[in-house]
C-alpha cells in the first residue's frame, strides 16, 4: 500500500464514519472524531464511563495523521502512518468490524415498477496453513431464488448503484432459499472446489512432519517410560506442520438487485 | 490425503440475528474499504517476506533478510541463529517474528533473554518492528499479553513457571542460548519442557570445543536431529572428533543453524585499533608480585592448587585490593590452617599493605583524561572495580559500575547514567555480556581474560552495527608478569584483536585443546623455569598457527552456512 493510498483510505474511513476533516492536505490530515469513533479507536473507556456518570459534555479527541513527512510542516504534531503502523491496522480492523454485515438495494433511476431479486453475497478468505501460510481472497454471490452462484461478486457489485433504503417503485422478491441454507451451499461449493485442488503443499508438510516425528521417536527411544516432554514435542510438531485450510468470512450480506444487474 | 477444512460459522449466527432485528447494517463505503484492506493484507504466496514492507523504521541488511527467509522457508521456523557478535541477531529474530505475525501463524510469543536485555528487547520490538512486546513485571501479564519478554531466571520459577506451561505459545525466542549447553541445569530442563512450535535460539558462541554442547543445544531445538543421546556419543564422541571435523555432523548442524560472519556480510565495519600499554610496577607492587611468584617453590604450598596461585598472580597485576580479598578468603576458608600457612598469608597481607599506589590506575587516569570522551573499563575483579570507582572519584571523574549481578532495572539505569551523565563505565566480566554501548568507542582492558571469547564479548559491546567511529582498545599489561606473557601469546602473536570471533572459534575448535585457559594455567603454574615456560608457550603458539593454517586451507568449507 503506497502512502497516497493510505491517505485516501484514511480519508474515506473517517468520512464514512461522519467525522469532520479539520484539515486534509497532501501529506497530512487532522480529523475531529465523533463520540462513536473516539470510543472505537481511542481506548479510553474510563473517560467515557465517567462522563456518562456525571453527565458532562463529551469532548471527543481529534487526531492528526502524517502520511508524508516531506509534505507535512516540520513542527506538526501527529502520528506518522505507514503500512506497518499499529494505528493503521487498528483502523483496518475497525473497518472490518463496523461493516461485517450489510443489506443493500439496487438504486434504479427510473419510475417503473422494478422487481429486485435477493442475493447472498460473501467475501471470504481461504487460508492454506501448515508451517507456512498463503491466503486467497474469494467473493461469491448466490441468487436466493434460482440458486445461481457467481464468482467475483464484489467486483460486479461495484458496477451497480446501491442504496441502503429500498427505492420508490422497487419491490423485493421473496427468497426461496433461506440465507442459512444459502450459506451452507456456498460452504459446500467452496469445499468441493478446494478438495479438487492440488494439495502437494500439504503432502510436503506431512512429509516434513513425519520426518521430524521419526527423529523425535528415535530420540526418546532409550527412555524406559514415556515422559511429558515427548508428548509436548509431539504436539508441537502437529501444530507446526499439520496442514489445514481455514475459511473465514470477511463480510457479506443481502443484496437486492434487478434481473440484469449481475 | 484430504486436508481438514474449517469454515467459520460464527458469521452465520450474527447474520441471522441481524435479519431478525432488521439490522443494524453496515455502511457500504466501509464495506468496500474493508474489502480493499483485505486485498492488501492477503498473502497469496507461501514464499517470500512480507515483513520489510511493514517496517518503515528499519532497513534490514541483506544477510539479515536472507537469514529470515532461510529460517522460515528451509528450516520451518526452528533455528539457531549464531551470527558473530554485532551482526544483528535481534533484527533477524524480529524479522522472523514479524513475518509470522503478519501471516497470522504466530500470535503468542515468549522471549527469554538475560535480565539486562529485557527492556532493550521490548523497546526494540516496539520501536523498530511495531510489535507490542511487553516486559514481564507482574504475573498476570503472562495470560493477558501476547508478546512477552522475560528473563529466564524469572520465568523458570513458580508461580511463573506453571503459568507459562499453561500458555499455548506459538513462538519461543531465547537469547544468549549458549547458556543452555548443559542439559543438567534447571534452565535447560525448563526450556526443554516448553512447547516449541516455532523456536529461535540466539547465540554468538555456538560451537566451542565441546561436542556435547552442540548436541544439547540442537536437541533442545529439534530433539532427535542429531540422534538420541546414546547413539550420538557412540558415533562422535568415541572418535574424539570435533564438530568441524565431521562433514556429516557439520551438515546436520547447518540444517538448523545459520552463522553469518562479518567478512561475508559485505558491510564496511569501522576499524579496531589495538594499543598495548606496558606498565611498570612500582617497587612495592613488584615485591608483592615476586612474593606470590616465589610461593611456588615452597613445599607447604604444593597442596594449594596451581589455579589459586595463578589467580593471585593475575590479581596482583590488577590491584592490591583484589589480592587482599582472595588472601582473606584463603585464610578464612581453610580448615585448621597450620601456623606456617597463616604466617605465609599474613606476610603476604603485610606486603599488600605496603603497596601505596596502583600503577595501572594511574595510567588509566592519565589515559581517560587524554581521551576526554566516554570510556569503558573492563576488569575481572570486583575488588578492582570498587577501587577504581573510588580512585576516579578522588580525581573528579564520574563513573558508574556495571555487574552481571545487577537487577534488570539497575542495569538499564546504569547504562542510561553512563550515556547521559558519567564519563566512565567500570564493568566486571559478567557485565560484559548483553548490553549495547555503541555510543562509546574506547575500551580499556584493565586486565585481560584468558578466554579469548570473553574478550570478544567485551569488544562486541561497542564494535557492532551502529558504531560510527573506529573502536579504540587499550590493553594494560604489567611488564615481566604472566599478564605480559598471555598478552604476547594470545593477543599479539595470534593477533586476536584484529581478528574476529568467527575465525577464532574455528581456530580453537581445530585445536581440540579443550580449554585454552587450562593450558595457560598449566604452562604458568607448572613450569619450573622461565625457559620451560617460554618453550611451552612457543609450542602453544605454533599449534595455534598450525590450526589457523589448516583453517585457511579449507576456508569456507568450514564456514557455518550451507
Image (cartoon, coloured by chain):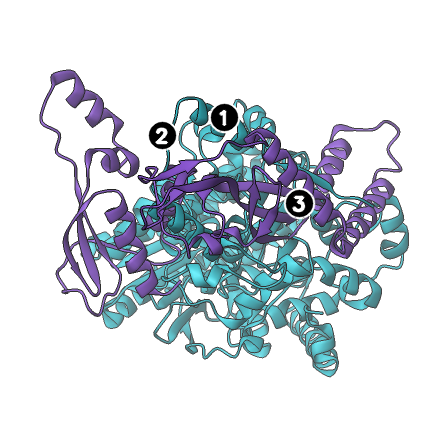
- For mark 2, does the 10 Å Cα neighbourhood hold few (<14), some (14 to 19), or many (20 or more) residues? few
Chain letter of the residue carrying label 3: A
* Label annotation for residue B156: none
Query: Residue B232 or B417: which is nearer the viewer?
Result: B232
Chain B's colour is: cyan
The letter of the purple chain is: A
Residue position for label 1: B16
Q: CA distance from mark 3 to mark 1?
A: 21 Å
- For mark 3, does the 10 Å Cα neighbourhood hold few (<14), some (14 to 19), or many (20 or more) residues? some
Spot the residue most to the front: A112
Residue position for label 2: B24
Q: Position of residue A81 (x, y in %)?
A: 30, 56
Q: Position of residue B256 (x, y in %)?
A: 70, 57
Residue B21 shown left or right of residue A198 in the figure: left
- For mark 1, does the 10 Å Cα neighbourhood hold few (<14), some (14 to 19), or many (20 or more) residues? some
Q: Quadrant of residue B81?
A: bottom right
Q: CA distance from mark 1 to mark 2?
A: 12 Å
Query: Residue B416 or B222: which is nearer the viewer?
Result: B222
**Residue B326 visible here:** yes
Q: Position of residue A36 (x, y in %)?
A: 24, 33
Amino acid at each position: 500500500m503506497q502512502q497516497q493510498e493510505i491517505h485516501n483510505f484514511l480519508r474515506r474511513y473517517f468520512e464514512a464514519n461522519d467525522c469532520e476533516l479539520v484539515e486534509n492536505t497532501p501529506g497530512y490530515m487532522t480529523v475531529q472524531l465523533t463520540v462513536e469513533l473516539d470510543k472505537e479507536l481511542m481506548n479510553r473507556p474510563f473517560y467515557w464511563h465517567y462522563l456518562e456518570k456525571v453527565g458532562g459534555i463529551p469532548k471527543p479527541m481529534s487526531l492528526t495523521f502524517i502520511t508524508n513527512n516531506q509534505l507535512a510542516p516540520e513542527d506538526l504534531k501527529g502520528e506518522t502512518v505507514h503500512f506497518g503502523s499499529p494505528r493503521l491496522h487498528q483502523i483496518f480492523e475497525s473497518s472490518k468490524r463496523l461493516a461485517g454485515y450489510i443489506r443493500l438495494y439496487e438504486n434504479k433511476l427510473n419510475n417503473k415498477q422494478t422487481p429486485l431479486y435477493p442475493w447472498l453475497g460473501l467475501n471470504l478468505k481461504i487460508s492454506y496453513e501448515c508451517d507456512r501460510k498463503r491466503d486467497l481472497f474469494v467473493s461469491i454471490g448466490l441468487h436466493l431464488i434460482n440458486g445461481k452462484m457467481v464468482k467475483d461478486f464484489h467486483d460486479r457489485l461495484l458496477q451497480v448503484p446501491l442504496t441502503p433504503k429500498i427505492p420508490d417503485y422497487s419491490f423485493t422478491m421473496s427468497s426461496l432459499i433461506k440465507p442459512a441454507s444459502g450459506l451452507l451451499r456456498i460452504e459446500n461449493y467452496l469445499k468441493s472446489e478446494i478438495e479438487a485442488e492440488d494439495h502437494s503443499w500439504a503432502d510436503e508438510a506431512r512429509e516434513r512432519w513425519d520426518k521430524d516425528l521419526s527423529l523425535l521417536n528415535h530420540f526418546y527411544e532409550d527412555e524406559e517410560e514415556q515422559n511429558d516432554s515427548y508428548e509436548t514435542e509431539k504436539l508441537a510438531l502437529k501444530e507446526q506442520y499439520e496442514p489445514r485450510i481455514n475459511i473465514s468470512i470477511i463480510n457479506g450480506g443481502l443484496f437486492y438487485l434487478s434481473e440484469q444487474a449481475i | 490425503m484430504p486436508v481438514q477444512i474449517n469454515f467459520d460459522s460464527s458469521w452465520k449466527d450474527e447474520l441471522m440475528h441481524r435479519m431478525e432485528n432488521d439490522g443494524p447494517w453496515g455502511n457500504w463505503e466501509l464495506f468496500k474499504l474493508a474489502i480493499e484492506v483485505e486485498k492488501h493484507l492477503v498473502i497469496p504466496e507461501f514464499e517470500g517476506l512480507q515483513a520489510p514492507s511493514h517496517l518503515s523504521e528499519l532497513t534490514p541488511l541483506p544477510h539479515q533478510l536472507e537469514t529470515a527467509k532461510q529460517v522460515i522457508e528451509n528450516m520451518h521456523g526452528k533455528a539457531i541463529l549464531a551470527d558473530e557478535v554485532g551482526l544483528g541477531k535481534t533484527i533477524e529474530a524480529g524479522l522472523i517474528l514479524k513475518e509470522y505475525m503478519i501471516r497470522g501463524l504466530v500470535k503468542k510469543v515468549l522471549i527469554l533473554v538475560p535480565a539486562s536485555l529485557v527492556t532493550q528487547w521490548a523497546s526494540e520490538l516496539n520501536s523498530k518492528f511495531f510489535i507490542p512486546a511487553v516486559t514481564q513485571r507482574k504475573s498476570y501479564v503472562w495470560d493477558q499479553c501476547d508478546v512477552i519478554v522475560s528473563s529466564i531466571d524469572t520465568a523458570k520459577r513458580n508461580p511463573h513457571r506453571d503459568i507459562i506451561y499453561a500458555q499455548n505459545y506459538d513462538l519461543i525466542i531465547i537469547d544468549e542460548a549458549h547458556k543452555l549447553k548443559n542439559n543438567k541445569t534447571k534452565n535447560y530442563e525448563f526450556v526443554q519442557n516448553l512447547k516449541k512450535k516455532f523456536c529461535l535460539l540466539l547465540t554468538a558462541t555456538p560451537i566451542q570445543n565441546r561436542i556435547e554442547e552442540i548436541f544439547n543445544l540442537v536437541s533442545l531445538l529439534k530433539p532427535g536431529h542429531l540422534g538420541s543421546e546414546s547413539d550420538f556419543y557412540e558415533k562422535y564422541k568415541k572418535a574424539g572428533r570435533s564438530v568441524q571435523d565431521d562433514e556429516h555432523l557439520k551438515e546436520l548442524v547447518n540444517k538448523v543453524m545459520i552463522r553469518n560472519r562479518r567478512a561475508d556480510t559485505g558491510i564496511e565495519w569501522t576499524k579496531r585499533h589495538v594499543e598495548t600499554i606496558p606498565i611498570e610496577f612500582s617497587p612495592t607492587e613488584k615485591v608483592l608480585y615476586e612474593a606470590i611468584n616465589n610461593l611456588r617453590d615452597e613445599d607447604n604450598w604444593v597442596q594449594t592448587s596451581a589455579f589459586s596461585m595463578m589467580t593471585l598472580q593475575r590479581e596482583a597485576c590488577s590491584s592490591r585490593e583484589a589480592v587482599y580479598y582472595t588472601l582473606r578468603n584463603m585464610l578464612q576458608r581453610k580448615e585448621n590452617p597450620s601456623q606456617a600457612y597463616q604466617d605465609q598469608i599474613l606476610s603476604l597481607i603485610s606486603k599488600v599493605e605496603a603497596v601505596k599506589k596502583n600503577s595501572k590506575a594511574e595510567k588509566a587516569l592519565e589515559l581517560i583524561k587524554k581521551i576526554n570522551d566516554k570510556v569503558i573499563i573492563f576488569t575481572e575483579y570486583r575488588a578492582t572495580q570498587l577501587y577504581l570507582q573510588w580512585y576516579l572519584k578522588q580525581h573528579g571523574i564520574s563513573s558508574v559500575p556495571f555487574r552481571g549481578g545487577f537487577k534488570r532495572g539497575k542495569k538499564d539505569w546504569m547504562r542510561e547514567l553512563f550515556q547521559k551523565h558519567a564519563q566512565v563505565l567500570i564493568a566486571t566480566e559478567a557485565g560484559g555480556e548483553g548490553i549495547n554501548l555503541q555510543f562509546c568507542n574506547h575500551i580499556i582492558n584493565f586486565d585481560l581474560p584468558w578466554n579469548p571469547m570473553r574478550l570478544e564479548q567485551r569488544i562486541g559491546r561497542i564494535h557492532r552495527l551502529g558504531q560510527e567511529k573506529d573502536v579504540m582498545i587499550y590493553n594494560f599489561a604489567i611488564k615481566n608478569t604472566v599478564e605480559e606473557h598471555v598478552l604476547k601469546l594470545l593477543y599479539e602473536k595470534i593477533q586476536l584483536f584484529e581478528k574476529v570471533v568467527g575465525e577464532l572459534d574455528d581456530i580453537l575448535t581445530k585445536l581440540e585443546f579443550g580449554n585454552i585457559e587450562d593450558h595457560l594455567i598449566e604452562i604458568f603454574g607448572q613450569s619450573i623455569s622461565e625457559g620451560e615456560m617460554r618453550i611451552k608457550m612457543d609450542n602453544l603458539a605454533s599449534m595455534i598457527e598450525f590450526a589457523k593454517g589448516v583453517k585457511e586451507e579449507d576456508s569456507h568449507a568450514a564456514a557455518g552456512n550451507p
